Amino acid sequence: MAFHLPNDPASGDVTSARPTLWVNPLYRKGAIDDPSLPIRPEDVEAARANWQRLAPLLETCFPELAATGGVIRSDLIELGDLRQAIGYSDAEFGTLFVKADSALPVAGSIKARGGVYEVFVFAEQLARREGLLKDGQDIRQLAGPEAKAFFSRYTIAVGSTGNLGLSVGIAARALGFKATVHMSSDAKAWKVERLRNLGVEVVRHDADYTSAVENARIAAEADPTIYFVDDEQSRQLFLGYSVAAMELAKQLEDRGLVVDAEHPLFLYLPCGIGGAPGGVTYGAKAVFGDNVHCFFVEPVQSPCALVQMMSGSKELVSVYDVGLTNKTEADGMAVARMSVLVATVMRNMLAGVFTVDDPSLFRWLLLAHETQGIRLEPSATAGFAGPEFIVKHPRGRAFCDRQGIVDRLPQATHVVWTTGGSFVPQQQFENFLQTAAANR
Ligand SMILES: *Cc1c(COP(=O)(O)O)cnc(C)c1O
């Protein structure tokens, strides 16, 4: 073991790969106002404006977005039968929702908020810089034949365990870009096949996710016609995700649900490298302030954000450094080192991280499908552990106590962010169900 975790009540569980809750000792109110952070609340508003300006183009490229006028958004689903099935019927669990990014249009996962955003923002910038789109001209021109021919001279590259590659590949090909996706060895075969069918070049690396990203970066640096979507440090991905919080705020408001000191909000966000959950957390802090508490969730063998943030180290700590394997069926979260950008921004803003084992992921996958017909991939189910950790675990209760909200839990709202699944092919999904049934 190359690295020793600090003395924390959760350390032993982390290194022995037992599900656990780590509460961030550096969590504090008003953290978003820290002027030294590399992201500002205005950036979220600017990202929202970008999404809005790009909406007509998105609608033209993706007819499935006609119903929303080019807006990529997901439903907020209240837990009904699933609530009992999981064991959350007690009134102490407050109000429980699923934020169903698992069914997001265009990419079928939360990556539709990040990858699609970055590719479309890049396309617009490139077109303006090269004089293809002038002020006042209709942005839908960028879906026309002239723009396609122009974009085809450029390549969008990305490293991915799967879903980011899908979203970037789909977005890039829709505009006519060439696309190269560097995949890690744990990438699922169906994701590779789907990309190849779209005309995306898939390079498979016989190594983990971090190496796939490194290879993609090196290839891109050598060639000015390659634009690299850098999952380890991209601001654009982060900001694309952040806008999700405004969507959630509107949905809660439409249901007459208040978020304030009396009615806290908890978000449970599956974490790989940290961009998606970090972006959503940042946006949520910008929208709900100190009344929202965001927790990341990771597989017991891949808790990269947990070890990074617990270590407090400026250097990146990997899950291998603490003796873990990074092996999990949750391919969306099979990441050994977190993003430095996200670690910096989350330092005082993230409430904590909890971990889950693979059998639990399959159990929730089955229950969500059986009770409410919600189709999830294993990574997407991880947040279901959240309410139990917060309401029942001694450290969760102590956390609520310190926040002065322990007696307000029945009035709290818990949102389990389900991050992917609707694109999983039927055969693969049936395999998931079988795995789950066999473990029952
Ligand atoms: C990408 C992904 C995550 C985690 O997002 P990161 O930005 O890597 O932290 C979680 N779940 C699913 C299904 C994903 O595709």
Image (cartoon, rainbow, N blue to C red):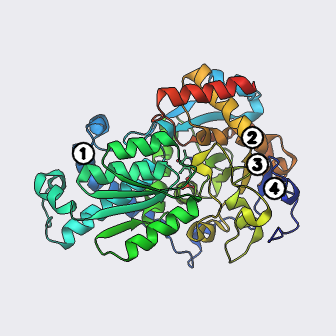
Q: In the rendered structure, which amino acid carries the disc numbered 2?
A: Leu
Disc 2 crowd rating (10 Å Cα; few below 14, some 14-19, many 20+) is many
Going from N to C along the chain, the mark reached first, 2 or 4, is 4
Q: In the rendered structure, which amino acid carries the disc numbered 1?
A: Cys
Asked if residue 243 can be seen in this view, the reply is no
Going from N to C along the chain, the mark reached first, 3 or 1, is 1
Residue under label 4: 14
Q: In the rendered structure, which amino acid carries the disc numbered 4?
A: Val
Q: Quadrant of residue 380?
A: top right
Q: Quadrant of residue 329?
A: top right
Cα distance, mark 1 to mark 4?
44 Å
Cα distance, mark 3 to mark 1?
46 Å
Q: Is residue 240 above or below residue 188?
A: below
Front label number (2 vs 1) = 1
Residue under label 3: 405
Q: Nearer the viewer, residue 240 or 319?
A: 319
Going from N to C along the chain, the mark reached first, 1 or 4, is 4
Residue under label 2: 409
Residue 290 x, y percent position in the rendering: 64, 58
Cα distance, mark 2 to mark 4?
27 Å
Residue under label 1: 61
